[in-house]
Image (cartoon, rainbow, N blue to C red):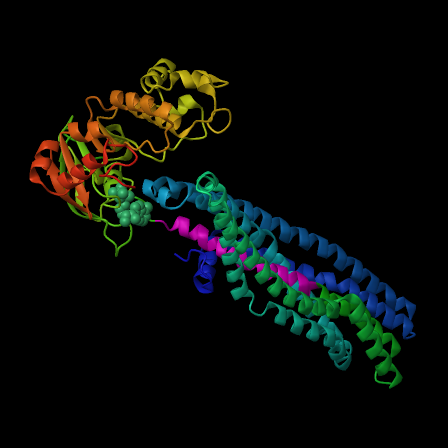
Amino acid sequence: MTDGSPAQRPDRAALARLLAPVRTRIRIAVVAQVAAALAAVVPFVAVAELGRLLLGGGAAAGAWPIVWVALGALAARFVLFFLAGGLTHLADADLQLDLRRRMATRLGQVPLGWFGARNSGTVKKALQDDVTAMHHLVAHSLLDLTAGIVTPVAALAYLVWVDWRMTLVTLLPVAAGLYFYARSMAGYGENMVAYDQALGRINGSAVEFVNGIAVVKTFGQSRKAHQRFTSAADDFATFFLDWVGGVTRISAIGQILLSPVVVLLVVLTGGTVFVTNGWLAPADVLPFALLGLGITAPITTLAQTSQQLRSARLAAAQVAAVLGTEPLPAPEAEAADPADGRVSLRNVHFGYTADTPVLRGIDLELAPGTVTALVGPSGGGKSTLAKLLPRFFDVTDGSVSIGGVDIRDLSAEQLYRRVSFVLQDVQLLRATVADNIRLAVPEADQSTVEAAARAAQIHQRILELPRGYDSVIGEDARFSGGEAQRVSIARALLADAPILVLDEATAFADPESESAIQQALSTLVAGRTLLVIAHRLSTVAEADQIAVLADGRVAELGTHLELLARQGLYARMWAAHERAGAWQPHTSPLETR
Ligand code: ADP
């Protein structure tokens, strides 16, 4: 995966692969554009030739064929131009559809955990912005590039044919302009990286400043946080002014040299010298005055186009990265249904990356209908372990099975009929509240949905929304963290899966929500096999078994009393908390995140 690195080669390869389905049409379009660009030069050549013919005292009758050729070329140019543009736009429409479909399919197959690791912004950017960046490339940039090269080359060829010495004179301002332009672009790559970093620092400190404003003010640190922001902004301004100040002077010189006035001045001065010395007929200056301007005009377009090409390559790499994500392997045939709801983790190993193992040989049995509490120091792997059961990720070694069947052999439908989860980062879809609740059971009727909402202590709150259950999340339904959690509990209640994975944290809940959530949870967990990241005294003390996770291993396993008697890690943590006072859900000694 290139992830936007400046490495050009893989980006280029990625782009070529993505464009493969529309390659033929793009090639035809480019050929049409070459012809259109040549045809575009013809009328200018015709005018120059007319001038040379008539001013040089040629027969007026010879002028007509030239006029007809010019008119024909003009017509051909428009036809070819529209043909090329039409072809690339059609190719682009097909390509966008194809890419978006392939990405949507792939996103449906990647592990659930993948979405947590990358924020949804990256996915949206790949789906929307990056595909659009490729639109510029396919529909416009390639054709602009073609015209930008063919037109000046054709004009130059004609001018060389008229007089090569005068052509060199015409090229003087172009060469000088290009030299300054190249100088202004020197170090562009490194400066762009520094630019992004400086901007990133500003964004970071702005977010810190705004997000933490309450804390910062409470502790009288507003000056400090404010200073971080202003100094980041000052650094950025200094860097940007240094860079842009230098570049602007140089590129301004380049632009002046390439401007029509300067080119015309050079051509006419050179022409006068050539004519007075008898090196050139007066009428032969005309082609240079006419077509010399046509050589400089595309140069600025070329600069823009190469920039678009660069961003299209980066965009292609991002899209290719999404398309190249390993899908969660689906079983070839649906496995036999598990015999019962017993969950077994055997020698489970897992790491987010190959070189940093997070779980290192976990063995754990969850008997049907029992509660297993996961406790242990922060970073010990509790959340990671909990996410393996609903297959957010697959184990790297060992196995997780339900009723004797490896969960990798179950179809998604078979798995999610048995396992549901209520985790900290609640995901609600931009759909009606009712549809969000009946996500796992789309055919559930209104009264069933309402019963689940009632049991989850959220029914009243939903009725207060403008359109009740038909309010749409994010439009006329906005929930606090605790309320969203209760909606997700209602969803899990309706799904009615026998196995439930639960993160008990109520970090986002307001005090009012908290008791409602606890009430909703007690309804939800009743009678299910429960794997819970425990934050509450009652859950831990009453669990059928407590697994103390430390360093990716089960350090201790047993009931509350058994573990206390062992005088080990759990007992020490417990003693520490006893000394500290009441077991607070947010400041639990066993879970200090
Ligand atoms: P706990 O829930 O016990 O606090 P976690 O399972 O959240 O522990 O984390 C265990 C380890 O895995 C930590 O070192 C953490 O940094 C790492 N980790 C957690 N989530 C991710 C992720 N999405 N990508 C990479 N590393 C992660």
Q: Where is residue 138 drawn, in percent x and y?
A: 56, 53
Residue lying farthest bottom? Answer: 277
At x 37%, y 39%, the residue is 108
Does the magenta segment cover residue 302?
Answer: yes
Which of the 4 quarters of the picture holds residue 234? bottom right
Question: Would residue 396 be found to the left or right of residue 189 on screen?
Answer: left
Residue reaching furthest top?
447
Q: Nearer the viewer, residue 294 or 190?
A: 190
* Above or below for 292 versus 92: below
- Would you say the magenta stretch is mainly helix, strand or loop? helix
Q: Is residue 225 magenta?
A: no
Q: Position of residue 235 (x, y in %)?
A: 55, 59
The x, y position of residue 199, in whole percent, is 53, 54
Q: Which residues are magenta?
A: 298-325
Instruction: Answer whether residue 111 is visible to the viewer in this image.
Output: no
Q: Residue at x 86, y 72 (%)?
A: 52
Residue 361 x, y percent position in the rendering: 15, 47
Is any atom of residue 339 visible in this view? yes
Q: Which of 490/97 is in front?
A: 490
Front position in the image: 4 or 94? 4
Picture quarter with the N terminus:
bottom left
Decide: is 336 above or below 349.
above
User: Could you tell me which quadrant the C terminus lies in?
Assistant: top left
Q: Which residue shows up at 41% across the image and 44% down it?
A: 119
Reply above or below: 252 against 380. Answer: below
Left or right: 72 as drawn, with respect to 371: right
